[in-house]
């Protein structure tokens, strides 16, 4: 897939009070001009992007038009016995795509090294090596975790990341609706590979969601603002994808298979962001009092009043209770292989200062067994001019740690000796320590951890954005003291506990 290089002519926010009359009148006038000069009506196909870019009332004005679709039904005749056979056929015409993918984060599952305070060496993080408080990590657990990798055959640490034929083109481009992935990323057994190859097209919400909506082992588990309702949402779930019918790639506009957008659950820096201001003006409101908030309050804070709007998301995961029989038949409460859960929907976010970057707990870091270890604590504070008050889902849990070495151990969950097979923590933790090159003392317990998920999706219609009293009232949702203020700035003239005054 390639994107248009058209540069938008106007990045102002659409006027949500408009009835579309000005756009209709403009188009009628253009039709009249075309007819007068005798030009064909098909001219609109050629000027569509510039028409959109010049019209401030058009929500699509900042979205480049995709390249015309090429029907592959005759180009990919098949039959194909394996996924790599399909990839080899794709690369015959798309030779550059393979090299592009080999350098992408979706392929490598790790990010370039970055310097971190308190670390002697630059740190490389990513899904490939980062511990979390869901299924904890992929090392030693590759067959299950890599069922969502954009590749074929990542079974263990010997996977060849330089082999272009192992790239899975279909997971992002299949439009047949029947493509699926199994352990280690191989196509599911019942998949008709020729049908999938002939159907390929621009990625849709269903393509992206096949991994991102179900990460963590089920629908809506991880993100809180991404779940299967986003495949065909109405505007009450997400205005952009529901009312406007945006696809993920309309905002995550991709060049050379490098997909913009970062998530601090796996990446420490916000070096390739997707921002509201890519399309909307930084002061988009008609009311100056609202625009005065934009330097200190993220757009998402007011425009994502709730997350997990329709389907529930996981908020608590306690591994210490795993391994028991007969606890509950409700998989939203308990699974023997994973322990106890708390799910909820229509959840009010939690709010923190955020500059787009985060800290990181790395395997081997010490922890306080009586406290809470923050696995990816957001950076930002009231005195940082870049930071804004931002909405988060915080996933809280208890996970295994070595009580002698005083650090988290990532257990081996899958395979003949995996915890999900024999329910033996001693063996699972010993094997997990081996897989991550760590020492295991043989003594273990369970310690608390928090993981932070910034909320970016499930944007509400403008009329459902937070009103003033949602924050500035006796029972407002913001904890002003925790944010560094003496109290509500409306009541305290902007005084802060850290000194100075807030603009």
Image: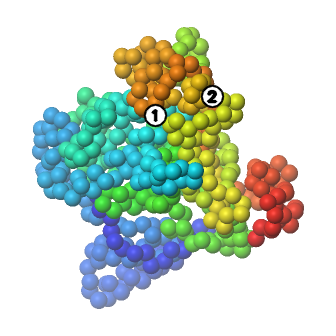
Residue 10 drawn above or below residue 268: below
| Image quadrant in which you'd find residue 185 | top left
Residue 306 drawn above or below residue 240: above
* SS label for mark 2: strand
Residue closest to the eye, 374 or 78: 374
Q: Position of residue 252 (x, y in %)?
A: 42, 58
Left or right position of 392 against 79: right
Residue 485 drawn above or below residue 321: below
**Residue shown at 32% from the left, 56% from the top:** 257
Q: Position of residue 96 (x, y in %)?
A: 21, 58
Q: Which label was assigned to residue 137?
A: 1
**Residue shown at 21% from the left, 35% from the top:** 192
| Outermost residue toward the front in this view | 120
Left or right position of 439 against 373: left
Mark 2 vs mark 1, CA separation in Å: 16 Å
Q: Position of residue 308 (x, y in %)?
A: 59, 42
Q: Which label was assigned to residue 404?
A: none
Quick one: label 2 or label 1, which is nearer the N terminus? 1
Q: Which label was assigned to residue 447?
A: 2
Residue closest to the eye, 240 or 438: 438
* SS label for mark 1: loop
Residue 307 visible in the displayed image: no
Q: Quadrant of the N terminus?
A: bottom left
Local packing at callout 1 (Cα closer than 10 Å; few below 14, some 14-19, many 20+) is many
Residue 486 visible in the displayed image: yes
Residue 215 drawn above or below residue 247: above
| Outermost residue toward the bottom in this view | 37
Q: Quadrant of the C terminus?
A: bottom right
Q: Position of residue 362 (x, y in %)?
A: 52, 41
Local packing at callout 2 (Cα closer than 10 Å; few below 14, some 14-19, many 20+) is many
**Residue shown at 12% from the left, 45% from the top:** 77
**Residue shown at 40% from the left, 75% from the top:** 7
């Amino acid at each position: 897939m390639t994107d248009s290089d058209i540069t938008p002519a106007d990045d102002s926010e659409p006027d949500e009070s408009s009835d579309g009359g000005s756009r209709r009148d403009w188009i009628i006038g253009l039709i009249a001009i075309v007819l007068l000069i005798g030009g064909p009506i098909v001219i609109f196909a050629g000027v569509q992007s510039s028409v959109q870019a010049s019209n401030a009332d058009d929500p699509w004005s900042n979205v480049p038009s995709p390249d015309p679709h090429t029907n592959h039904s005759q180009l990919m005749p098949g039959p194909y016995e394996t996924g790599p056979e399909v990839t080899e056929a794709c690369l015959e015409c798309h030779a550059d795509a393979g090299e592009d993918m080999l350098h992408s984060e979706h392929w490598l599952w790790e990010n370039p090294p970055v310097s971190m305070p308190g670390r002697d060496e630059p740190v490389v993080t990513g899904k490939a090596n980062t511990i979390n408080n869901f299924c904890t990590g992929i090392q030693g657990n590759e067959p299950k975790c890599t069922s969502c990798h954009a590749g074929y055959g990542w079974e263990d640490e010997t996977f060849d990341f330089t082999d272009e034929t192992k790239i899975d083109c279909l997971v992002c481009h299949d439009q047949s609706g029947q493509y699926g992935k199994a352990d280690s990323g191989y196509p599911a057994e019942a998949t008709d590979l020729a049908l999938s190859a002939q159907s390929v097209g621009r990625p849709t919400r269903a393509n992206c969601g096949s991994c991102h909506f179900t990460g963590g082992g089920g629908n809506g588990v991880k993100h809180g603002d991404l779940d299967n309702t986003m495949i065909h949402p109405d505007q009450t779930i997400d205005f952009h994808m529901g009312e406007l019918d945006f696809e993920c790639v309309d905002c995550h506009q991709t060049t050379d298979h490098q997909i913009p957008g970062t998530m601090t659950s796996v990446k420490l820096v916000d070096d390739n962001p997707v921002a509201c201001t890519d399309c909307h003006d930084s002061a988009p409101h008609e009311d100056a009092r609202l625009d005065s908030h934009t330097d200190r309050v993220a757009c998402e804070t007011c425009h994502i009043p709730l997350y997990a709007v329709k389907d529930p998301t996981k908020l608590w995961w306690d591994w210490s209770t795993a391994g028991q029989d007969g606890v509950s038949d409700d998989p939203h409460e308990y699974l023997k292989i994973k322990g106890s859960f708390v799910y909820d929907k229509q959840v009010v976010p939690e709010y923190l200062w955020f500059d787009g970057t985060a800290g990181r707990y790395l395997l081997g870091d010490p922890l306080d067994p009586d406290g809470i270890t923050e696995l990816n604590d957001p950076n930002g504070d009231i005195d940082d001019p870049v930071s804004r008050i931002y909405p988060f889902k915080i996933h809280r849990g208890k996970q295994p740690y070595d009580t002698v070495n005083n650090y988290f151990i990532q257990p081996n969950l899958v395979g003949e000796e995996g915890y999900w097979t024999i329910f033996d923590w001693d063996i699972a933790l010993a094997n997990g320590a081996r897989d991550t090159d760590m020492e295991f003392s043989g003594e273990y317990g369970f310690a608390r951890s928090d993981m932070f998920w910034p909320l970016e999706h499930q944007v509400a219609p403008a009329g459902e954005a937070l009103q003033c009293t949602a924050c500035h009232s006796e029972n407002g949702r913001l904890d002003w003291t925790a944010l560094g203020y003496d109290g509500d700035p409306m009541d305290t003239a902007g005084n802060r506990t850290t000194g100075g005054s807030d603009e």
